[in-house]
Amino acid sequence: MKHGKKYVDSKKLIDKTKTYEVDEALKLVCDTAKAKFDETVEAHIRLGVDSRHADQQVRGAVVLPNGTGKSVRVAVFAKGDMAKAAEEAGAEIVGAEDLADRIQNEGFLDFDVAIAAPNMMGVVGKLGRVLGPRGLMPSPKAGTVTPDVAKAVTEAKAGKIEYRLDKTNIIHCPIGKASFGVEKLQENLDTLMDAIVKAKPAAAKGQYLRSCALASTMGPGVKFSPAKYTNAQ
């Protein structure tokens, strides 16, 4: 894959053989985010678990103290008072069977987070094939299936993110924008890493935090040491 001049120049600033301290890595990521837009900074965490086993799944959600820097469109499956509460909390899309039909029949997916009241899971469950692969399926573990839909909407708007393993046992999560600067990004990263460490499955053996890296949308990856999070366990 051919990279542009900015990427090539940025790569020269990073020692690929080195694992940086967290603050150093964040500074490098901010310094190498040279696109014309405000790049998102992502953390990539490889864990020493096997996601093929149910007892080694790592999944949850956490509210980043400084948000993600992204405006979030929220869809809520609810009726009656819960639907009204979701609208008052700022949800852009609220519906029940009608919303499910739009998603199923019209391919409507103009939202970033889906939340469901527990009594709507009979309706939402049929959308698994559509919402699941896009990471939009409401889940009790992520706090997106809840009787308190208003709180879930507020948290989603405030910067709540879901973390989960992919098939290669890596978690990929946004931790903010390059414009946040090192301090705010570090607060967000610390919150995410603490949540991942606390979610360590009892069945996980050996080293849990295998390797960690940060990268901006258009920038090269920077490896960072997870030692401070491991030592805090």
Image (cartoon, helix red, strand yellow):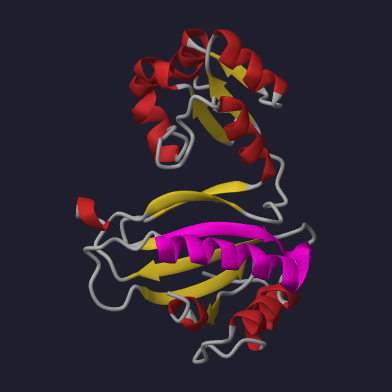
User: Residue 173 vs residue 175: left or right?
Assistant: left
Q: Residue at x 50, y 12 (%)?
A: 96
User: Can see residue 52?
Assistant: no
Q: Is residue 204 above or below residue 11?
A: above
Residue 28 image offset from top left, x and y in percent: 68, 80
Quadrant occupied by the C terminus: bottom left
Majority SS type along the magenta span: helix
- Number of numbered discs present? 0
User: Residue 199 vs residue 77: left or right?
Assistant: left
User: Residue 187 vs residue 202: left or right?
Assistant: right
- Magenta run includes residue 197: yes
User: Can see residue 82?
Assistant: yes
- Magenta run includes residue 1: no
Residue 26 image offset from top left, x and y in percent: 66, 76
Q: Residue at x 60, y 80 (%)?
A: 22
Q: Is residue 8 above or below residue 57?
A: below
Q: Residue at x 63, y 54 (%)?
A: 64
Residue 59 image offset from top left, x and y in percent: 39, 51
Residue 6 image offset from top left, x and y in percent: 72, 74
Magenta-colored span: 171-198
